[in-house]
Image (cartoon, grey):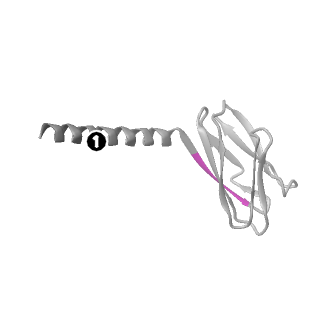
Amino acid sequence: MRKNAFLLVALFTSFFLSFQAAVAKDKEKHTIQLQMKDGDLIPLVLEAPANTIIRIEVSNIGSGPAEFESLQLRKEKVLAPGVTSVVVIPPKKPGEYDFFDDFHLDKPKGKLIIK
C-alpha cells in the first residue's frame, strides 16, 4: 500500500512540475497581431516588452501578396492573400525597430517599440 501511495505522490508531483514549466514558458513570450492589407499595416505601431520572445502573428487580409520585412530585426516572411503566419523575434533590448511590406514600398513603414 505504501508503495502505491509513494508512486501516486511521485506521479502527481511530476505532473505539477511539468504544468508549472509549461505555464512559465508561455509567460516568457509576448504575442502581437499585425494585419497587412495591400501595403497598409494595421496597426502601424506595435509595442512589446524588452527581454522577451516576441511572436508577431501576421495576417495578410489584402488581395495580393504581402511581405513582412525588417532589416533591423533580420526577419522576412512572404504571405499569400488570406494567409496567417508567425514571425518570432528573439529577446531584444529597449528600442525602436522598423518593419515594412516589401511589396508596397510606397506605403508608410511600421514600428515595433520595445520598452
Q: Is residue 11 above or below residue 57?
A: above
Depth check: give the residue in front, 2 or 96.
Answer: 2
Identify the residue shown where x is 58% and y is 47%.
Answer: 31
Q: Quadrant of the C terminus?
A: top right
Identify the residue at the far top of this view: 93
Q: Quadrant of the N terminus?
A: top left
What amino acid type is highlighted by mark number 1?
Leu
Our reading of the magenta stretch's main secondary structure is strand
- Residue sitting at the far bottom: 63
Rendered view: 100 above or below 60? above
* Along the line of sight, the residue nearer the viewer: 7 or 35: 7
Residue 11 in the image: x percent, y percent? Answer: 28, 41
Does 101 appear above or below 46? below
Marks counted in the figure total: 1
Residue 108 position within the rendered picture, expressed as x and y whole percent measured from the top left? 81, 51
Residue 94, x across and y down, in percent:
66, 31
Q: Report whether 91 appears left or right of 39.
A: left
Is residue 34 highlighted in magenta?
A: yes
> Left of 109 or right of it: where is 28?
left
Residue occupying the point 56% across, 43% down: 30
Badge 1 density bin: few <14, some 14–19, many ≥20, Cα 10 Å: few
Residue stretch rendered in magenta on the structure? 31-36
* Residue depicted at 64% across the width and 42% down the height: 47
Q: Position of residue 28 (x, y in %)?
A: 52, 38
Q: Which of the two residues, 47 or 68, is positioned nearer the viewer here?
A: 68
The residue positioned 61% from the left and 42% from the top of the image is: 54
Q: Judging from the image, what secondary structure is the residue with disc 1 in?
A: helix
* Figure quadrant of residue 37: bottom right
Residue 44 magenta-highlighted: no
Q: Quadrant of residue 9?
A: top left
Residue of label 1: 11
In the image, taking residue 20 as reference, residue 74 lies left or right, namely: right
